[in-house]
Image (cartoon, helix red, strand yellow):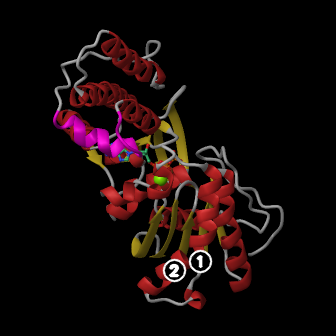
Amino acid sequence: LLTLAIETSCDETSAAVLKNGREVLSNVISSQTELHKKFGGVVPEVASRKHVENVDMVIQEALDLAGVSFKEIDQIGVTYGPGLVGALLVGVSVAKAMAYALNIPLIGVNHIEGHIYANFIEDPQLQPPFLCLIVSGGHSHLAYVKDYGEYEIMGKTRDDAVGEAFDKVARAIGLGYPGGPLIDQLAKKGNPEAIYFPRVYLENGSLDFSFSGLKSAVLNYLHTQRQKGKEIIVENVAAAFQQAVIEVLVNKTLEGARRKGADKIVLAGGVAANSALRQTLKMEAEKIGIKVKYPSLDLCTDNGAMIGCAAYYNYLKGYTADLYLNAVPNLKLGEVYENKTNYPQ
Ligand code: ATP
Ligand code: MG
Ligand code: FE
């Protein structure tokens, strides 16, 4: 069974072809990072327009690389939320047109579910149940994955997402965009003990996260140092900030695993690419006999392959969509699209 997957939720135009859910035949990613850099972040309208320009080419390249023609595709998966509405609409419109023209099933995929499923591509043996820490540009969830498509959200951020905090702190210390990978690199040269930033655990027993206070603490620190005319060692700021984030993420994740008796922890989302998070979580979890999995770096950030994998498992569950499928900017993990018609069966 061949799945064509399309992802346009943010600033990556991506298309992939997968065989039976986990075998990636192609995964073409056209990133708009360079385009948005000068604005210091993604400009939604610019992103939508670029998706329109790119999407046909990206799909054609994915088919060419996979060595398959349009006619051989059995189903189409597309991200329909969460994300930027104008950006999502590009992928959704193209996917609907293709599914209609080819008369094949259309599957609406949740982008965050896609991030989780990147792990199934990486490890063909991986099966639920497991605990998943999802840390991306717009989301931070601690979710227990009971089965394919079945999630229990144990905790989530109450303010900023982890990736957002990385990007904002990076901007404040004068790094470029996106800031996450730059902080990761810079932190390797810094001393995490040089500055103490708060670890926010919220009320007793809560597995929710909060990162806006930490972000403010970093901004305050920078401001105070500047006012006093003191030197700012950006490597130390990066390392201390990153350490504060990771400590909370790791402790809450291990507590979640303990509550569920989970023997596997899976990392997902763009921040899963963070080298210190990968190392620390793995080291701490292994001490108590829990295995840790994470995707390779190019499957952590947005890509079509993870959407194709999620589409395949949704298809097996019978979650196909009709042509009323629309972009849902604030789609929740675990929400299933309800058809208005019987097309296609
Ligand atoms: P979402 O998936 O929540 O809709 P998104 O798709 O914009 O948001 P992703 O592509 O999943 O986000 O991840 C991008 C985020 O990951 C950015 O905030 C980026 O800074 C962060 N990121 C990428 N690599 C690293 C890294 N090595 N360390 C820390 N953060 C990173
Ligand atoms: Mg992006
Ligand atoms: Fe994402």
Give the mark nearest the N terminus, 1 or 2. Answer: 2
Amino acid under disc 2: Leu
Count of numbered tags: 2
Q: Secondary structure at mark 1?
A: helix
Question: In this rendering, would 274 be left or right of 19?
Answer: left
User: Which residue appears at 41% of the width and 54% of the height?
Assistant: 301
Identify the disc placed on residue 56: 1
Q: Which picture quadrant has residue 172?
A: top left
Q: Secondary structure at mark 2?
A: strand
Identify the disc placed on residue 134: none
Q: Quadrant of the C terminus?
A: bottom right
What are the residue bounds of the magenta stretch?
A: 174-189
Q: Nearer the viewer, residue 144 or 52?
A: 52
Q: Nearer the viewer, residue 265 or 87?
A: 87
Q: Nearer the viewer, residue 27 or 208?
A: 27
Amino acid under disc 1: Asp
Position of residue 248 relative to residue 118, above or below, is: above
Question: In this rendering, would 279 be left or right of 1?
Answer: left
